[in-house]
Image (spheres, rainbow, N blue to C red):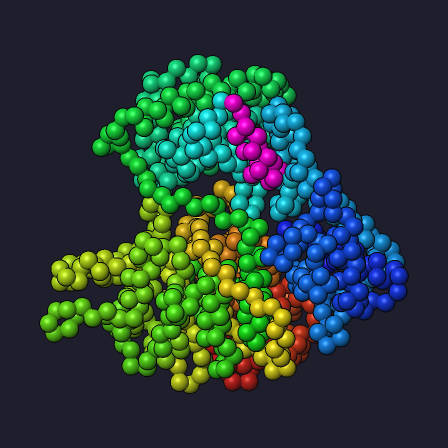
Amino acid sequence: MLPNELSNIFRNKQKSYKMVLILSLINEYEENHNLVFPLNKIAERFLAYYRHHSSPENPVDAPPQREASNWNDYTLAQTKTLLKTPIDALSSILEFNNDQQAITFKSFITNELNDNVIQELKAYAQNELDSYNNQLTSNEIGAAFSLQNTLTEILNSYLHAKTQTFANHPLGVLFRQTIPEQLRKLPFIDVNVNYKIQGSIGQGNWANIPWIAIMDKRITGTTQQGQYIVYLFSEDMRNVYLTLAQGVTLPIKEWGRKEAYQYFEQKVTEIRDQLPLESMQKDDNIHLTTSGLGRDYQVSTVAYVRYDRDSIPDDDQLLADLENVMNNYKLYVDSLTQEPVEENEPTFEYEELEPLDPLTVSPRVEQIKTYIEQRGFHYPTGLIENLYLSLKTKPFVILAGVSGTGKTKLVKLFAEALGATGSNHQFTLIPVRPDWSDPSDLLGYKDLSGAFRPGRLAEVLVEASQPENRHKPFFICLDEMNLARVEYYFSDLLSIIETQEWNNNRIVTSPLINRDSLRSEDQSIYGDLYLPDNVYLIGTVNMDETTHPFSKKVLDRANTIEFNYINLQQYPNDYRAEQQEMIVADNQFLRSEYLQLVDMYRDYSDLVHKTTEKLVKINHILEEIHAQVGFRIRDSICFYMVYNQRFQLLTEDEAFDLQLLQKILPRVQGSSLSVKRVLLQLMQGALGKSLVVNDLIEDASDLYQKWSSSQGEEDAKHPQTAKKIAFMLRRLEEDGFTSYWLS
């Protein structure tokens, strides 16, 4: 049986490169019996595989299009450069020695390798590669499409599929590509009408109710609102419903459930009176799930046809049913497009944005890391992933550490890698002055004549709010933000961040500047100025005798990322051959998708419950020093964990480790035995094993000496948290007081 470290290395695969790399390494080992693999030899084997296996009948992944159209034109030098991608993707088990130009397994993997393990790894890589290539072949050739067979396959396989890895699952291809492509070919789908056909099995995690929708874009382009046709699969996979339905998400967000339900019921009655709806059920007897969205669907469905798993009709009947629903839908859309909409008809404006594909996030983050490394800067493993997830969770992040660790440079390079620079005004550096005592230094003030004099932050917010800029991310770096007391000059922003809410598919806040307080000539520019959802605030802080500490009000609203551990022996790599270009990123890449737990609870309830149970145990510990976390921190940690699961950037333990470090430990400080007891109890959780707390109360030196700043001598469930707690314990014993911030 494969060791755990090797058993899931292919769970996330956008390409076949990782499997071919592993097979190339094993083939080289079988020939030379050496676990140091020269890059040149591996590149030859890697390139030979693609050259020999590429054919129209058996397609393989193509090389990067910007470099060559086929593998025969691809050079060995290009292959060696390309190999950096799968080597980085397998960095948990592989290392690359730049001096020797050689690849090796990490030492803990090498220790477990024997002939049996190598053969199992080879079989695992070959099976994954064959499966991947078969999928390419089936997509290329395509089989005769049967709606009956497709629905039957989904109903019979979906529950089992939910126990498997989500990323790159064949059902995802079926819902997102195959079925929409086949439905577009149906003769009664009018090619002259701009239909949007979309399917989903969830975003980053399996949905309880997968669906396939047909939308006439003249009335809606999103399943969140409007009327459309949709196949809805029940949670228990006993039934699938072909429905004429209404989108529920935006009306419920805008009005609340009670008022939205009244609208849905009124609309259902109106449409049922208007359309024939022959051979369709016109009641609310739809049973999709026992809770949550099930009731929303019942109230909002106009009419439906139900199919039971064990008696799916033949294709002729299924297509006849679909054509009938399409004819009714066309009648309804025609009535809307030919008649003016009544003034009391509610509409929800939205921006038509394609859902963020979780499979594109990891490669983009890797591109950001490569861009930063090629500029000669190295940061701790996982830091860029952590910064991305933190910004995605909430648009305010604090970077803390000793002076000279590259905090400000990290913000600039991260923004630059996404196309946000000072020259295009998407990156702004605002140095904080020690004499700042109120928000006017950031936002602006009225002079003696009554004219408004905008601060630098206000100018950026105006620029970011322009319609042509709303899809661009804007970064503001507040440099050395604790030179002044943060609560004095930043309190308005801290409060405003908590007023975020959805409005017309954008995130808006309460105004920062009241329109009525300004002159009429200033109102058009600065009146009701708010924090738009494409602005990201990142503060850098040095913790020393010249700076001010943070209050819980600040810490509750930010992820505080600390990097004090410095490796001076990191040197720039030679990337002169080819520089990673900037990624011109749409704001959707960074923008939060969840503001409240209800926004994601339906799809990620298991992870929310699991995370909350951990926090409940932590709160029992923190009660002793009155440092418990509230709903705001619970929600923030859950959002972070869900984004990480969707995008598969870190393991679950790694992600929770960082949240303990960034959201829990900054709350702990003091000089009492209670503080020490809390730290020791938290250390138990971080290590994943029991400690004799009473024995360590007097002297914990044996414990914290094993976790010096340079190394930890034992495995831990949450090593970064353990290392920080050890530091805090040492400070408490040596200085009589401890805090997360002591340097």
Q: Kindly indicate the quadrant of the structure image that contains residue 149.
A: top right
Q: How many marks?
A: 0
Q: Which secondary structure class fits the magenta region best?
A: helix
- Looking at the image, is 649 positioned above or below residue 299? below
- Looking at the image, is 314 positioned above or below residue 449? above
Residue 560 in view (yes/no)? no
Q: Position of residue 129 (x, y in %)?
A: 74, 48
Q: Position of residue 185 (x, y in %)?
A: 54, 28
Q: Residue at x 74, y 44 (%)?
A: 55
Confirm whether the magenta stretch covers residue 174: yes
Q: Position of residue 160 (x, y in %)?
A: 66, 37
- Left or right placement of residue 511 versus residue 734 in this view: left
Residue at the limit of the structure toward the front, as seen here? 73
For this rendering, which residue is in front, 405 or 50?
50
Residue 70 in view (yes/no)? yes
Q: Residue at x 65, y 69 (%)?
A: 692
Q: Position of residue 7 (x, y in %)?
A: 74, 53
Q: Kindly indicate the quadrant of the structure image that contains residue 494.
A: bottom left
Confirm whether the magenta stretch covers residue 235: no
Q: Residue at x 23, y 69 (%)?
A: 454
For this rendering, which residue is in front, 654 or 351?
351
Q: Which residues are magenta?
A: 171-187
- Looking at the image, is 328 positioned above or below residue 419? above
Q: Residue at x 62, y 31 (%)?
A: 154
Residue at the limit of the structure toward the left, as seen here? 449
